[in-house]
Image: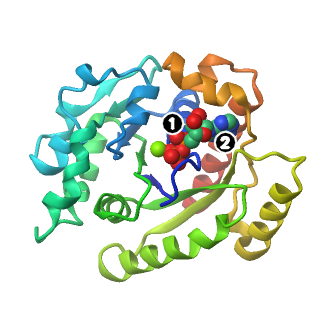
């Protein structure tokens, strides 16, 4: 269970959730994407119109709806989604004062349920904040994947994120790992992007994925066709990068299991 998190907006969280999910599904894994952002971009990007989102993450977290009832198929085989709508934007306020407020997602998705549903990977698309929703994701997840846009200040936001990770480790989820930091929207010819990559690799070392996601217009076009870029344009640089990210992630997991 991997939370895709960064409190900055527009860094490629949703794009990564959709396309890493699609790439893992194409590699034969059963993937469940949980849309934890009230903007519901992951749901839209996978073709779920708002009116088709009958039960949502809100119902699962706040109303105690069984997660299996909220799961929807997508056009991509083996990729399923728990959609979100703008309802979820009030969740943070509604959760304040609830005793187990950080544990709702963890309680909603038990390993036994995932086994029953045949799910291999859960990807959680977090909102652009370090709100209770993101904390719920970090408490439920085994690891976090941090998309980092190759631009100035990218690394500064990271220390804030890591503080939250440390807090979650101390209080609720001591085993929370960093799956990796993913450089996104990378323009290899841009000097600043090169510098950000060099800095990230120097300070974070092995935590940075070898795979870098290039800036690629096909990636940004795909959601308006309700498709992962891997289906929209399989030969594009963006599609190939996400396929390679899925390979790298699977290799890391094999290594960890050994
Ligand atoms: N590799 C990429 N190349 C080009 N555009 C991208 C790429 N990744 C993301 N984008 C675009 O950047 C914008 C922000 O990405 P998004 O995944 O929604 O970020 P977040 O979920 O972190 O807010 C979107 O319009 C998306 O289509
Ligand atoms: Mg998003």
Q: Nearer the viewer, mark 1 or mark 2?
A: 1
Query: Is label 2 within 8 A of ligand 1 (CB to nearest ligand atom)?
Result: no
Q: Is residue 39 above or below residue 175?
A: above
Q: Residue drawn 51% across and 36% down?
A: 21
- Residue 110 point in image, percent of width and height: 24, 52
Query: Residue at coordinates 21% horizontally, 41% vertically from top-left?
Result: 87
Q: Position of residue 200 (x, y in %)?
A: 74, 67
- Secondary structure, mark 1, is helix
Q: Would residue 180 appear left or right of 121 to someone viewing this image?
A: right
Residue 105 image position (x, y, % from top left): 25, 55
Residue 162 visible in rendering: yes
Q: Is residue 214 or residue 81 the one in the foreground? A: 214
Pick the residue in front: 128 or 162: 128
The residue wearing badge 2 is 247
The local crowd at label 2, few if under 14, some if 14 to 19, many if 20 or more residues have their Cα within 10 Å, is some
What separation in Å lies between label 1 and label 2 (alpha carbons)?
Answer: 12 Å
């Amino acid at each position: 269970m991997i939370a895709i998190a960064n409190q900055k907006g527009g860094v490629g969280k949703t794009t990564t959730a959709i396309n890493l999910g699609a790439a893992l599904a194409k590699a034969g894994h059963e993937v469940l994407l949980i849309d934890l952002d009230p903007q519901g971009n992951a749901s839209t990007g996978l073709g779920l119109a708002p009116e088709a989102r009958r039960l949502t993450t809100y119902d699962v977290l706040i109303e105690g709806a069984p997660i299996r009832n909220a799961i929807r198929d997508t056009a991509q085989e083996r990729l399923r989604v728990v959609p979100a709508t703008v309802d979820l934007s009030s969740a943070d306020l509604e959760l304040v004062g609830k005793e187990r407020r950080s544990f709702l997602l963890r309680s909603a998705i038990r390993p036994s349920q995932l086994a029953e549903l045949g799910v291999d990977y859960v990807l959680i698309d977090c909102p652009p904040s370090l709100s209770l929703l993101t904390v719920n994701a970090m408490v439920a997840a085994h690891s976090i994947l941090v998309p980092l846009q190759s631009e100035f200040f990218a690394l500064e936001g990271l220390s804030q994120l890591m503080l939250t990770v440390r807090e979650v480790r101390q209080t609720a989820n001591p085993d929370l790992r960093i799956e990796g930091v993913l450089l996104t929207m990378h323009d290899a010819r841009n000097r600043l992007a090169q510098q950000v990559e060099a800095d990230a690799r120097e300070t974070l070392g092995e935590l940075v994925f070898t795979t870098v996601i290039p800036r690629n217009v096909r990636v940004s076009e795909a959601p308006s066709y309700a498709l992962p870029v891997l289906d929209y344009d399989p030969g594009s640089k963006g599609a190939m990068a996400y396929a390679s990210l899925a390979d790298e992630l699977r290799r890391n997991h094999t290594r960890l299991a050994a």
